[in-house]
Amino acid sequence: MPHDRRLDAYPEALLKEAKIRIQEFGLIHIPTVYIGGGTPSILGAAGIGRLLSGLGKLWNQGLQGPGEITVEANPESAGEAFLKTCRDQGVTRLSLGIQTFYEPSRRAVHRVGDGALLQERLRLARDIFGPGFSGDLMTGLPLQDEGILLKDIERLLAYEPGHVSLYALTLEPGTPLASQAMLKGTGLPDPDRADALWIAGRDTLERQGYGQYEVSNFSRPGMEALHNIRYWRMENWLGLGPGASGTIIDDAEAPSIKGRRFTVNPDVDAYIAGSTGALLPREAAGTGVSIEDLDRLTLMKETFLMGFRYRKGPDAGLFHRRFGRAMETCIPHTIARWRKRGLLESEPLALTREGLLFLHAFLEAAFREVEKSGPGRLP
């Protein structure tokens, strides 16, 4: 397979955009960094080394650097040289996408790499990062049953990860797997069975000492992903790279709060060629960036959307500073009903362990209630 030269140019393009965004927003501190949302390990040891080294130079130029740097990796492209380069360049967390060890299920969802490769890469992750690595598993896969899932968990936990993500398979419309699901004999569990599989996985992880701190995330004490917690709390984040988005909320305007979301053009070739420029002036042609204004109602709904995924709920203090009111005054009827059902805790205001299973229903009720106020009458 011929080498894609874009992989050589991509780290420099990403660093160029990072410098633009840092200057643009006058940043003095980057609390966390997450390199992922794709397959960063495809850059190889040399590519990830150039990227991490370049970011390190930014921290040495007066910018306060992060306390956590996470890199996602697929096992097939995360060899020893790649992992050691990450560690040596300051990466503190590795997220390794396992999904399943069961070969028929892996083939059914077009995952490459067999069980022997997975175990080799897990051994490397354990030896190089210790408990600072996370393994991703999936439930609801074709041909998967409870015994297979629990065996997957057992095999992963043998490498003592500090963190485990347990995701339920989502069928995106238009994908080959979604089309296959319409046919009989594909081995996909029905929705009720898929839900039961996930719950069995959750219960097993908890018995093994991994606490659920978000809908799909479990960790040993002190090993929670700080970057993701910031995201669920609706703190500001910058998204860099083709197709990435970032959200900047102007807390100085609270409680007349407003924000901006920018999204980078997904065209990789245009991105590398340097078409991604500054966000402002907004009407400038050829910036490769689209901008969306976020009003108070939208930001409040998104705060609920992200915050109630988190086991501790939205940050009550941050919510009050931004919106000038307590959450209880914005969705009082929804809160009262869910408390009565025993699915919502008061201190902190958060869904219970069982309440998280009904997150979507809770959010629908909360959105209906806050929308009835209308943007002009929002509490």
Image (cartoon, grey):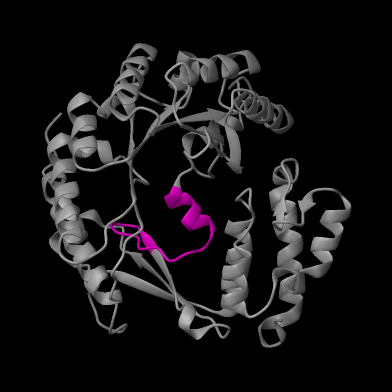
Estimate the x, y position of residue 83 in percent, counting from the top left: 24, 31
Which residue lies most toward the right here? 340
Asked if residue 123 lies left or right of residue 329, the reply is left
Q: Quadrant of the C terminus?
A: bottom right
Residue 200 against residue 294 in the figure, above or below: above
Q: Residue at x 71, y 41 (%)?
A: 353
Q: Residue at x 33, y 18 (%)?
A: 123
Say if residue 143 shows up in the picture. Answer: no
Q: Main secondary structure of the magenta part?
A: loop
Asked if residue 263 lies left or right of residue 61, the reply is right
Q: Quadrant of the N terminus?
A: top left
Residue 204 against residue 11 in the figure, above or below: above
* 359 vs 142, nearest the viewer: 359
* 61 vs 264, nearest the viewer: 61
Residue 232 lies within the magenta run: yes
Q: Residue at x 58, y 83 (%)?
A: 255
Residue 303 lies within the magenta run: no
Residue 87 against residue 372 in the figure, above or below: above
Which residue range is magenta in the image?
Answer: 226-245
Asked if residue 316 lies left or right of residue 273, the reply is right
Q: Residue at x 40, y 31 (%)?
A: 97
- Quadrant assignment, res 328: bottom right
Say if residue 166 shows up in the picture. Answer: yes
- Quadrant assignment, res 103: top left
Estimate the x, y position of residue 210 in percent, counting from the top left: 57, 30
Which residue lies most toward the bottom here? 376
Estimate the x, y position of residue 160 in percent, counting from the top left: 44, 22
Estimate the x, y position of residue 49 in percent, counting from the top left: 15, 42
- Tag count: 0
Asked if residue 368 lies left or right of residue 22, the reply is right
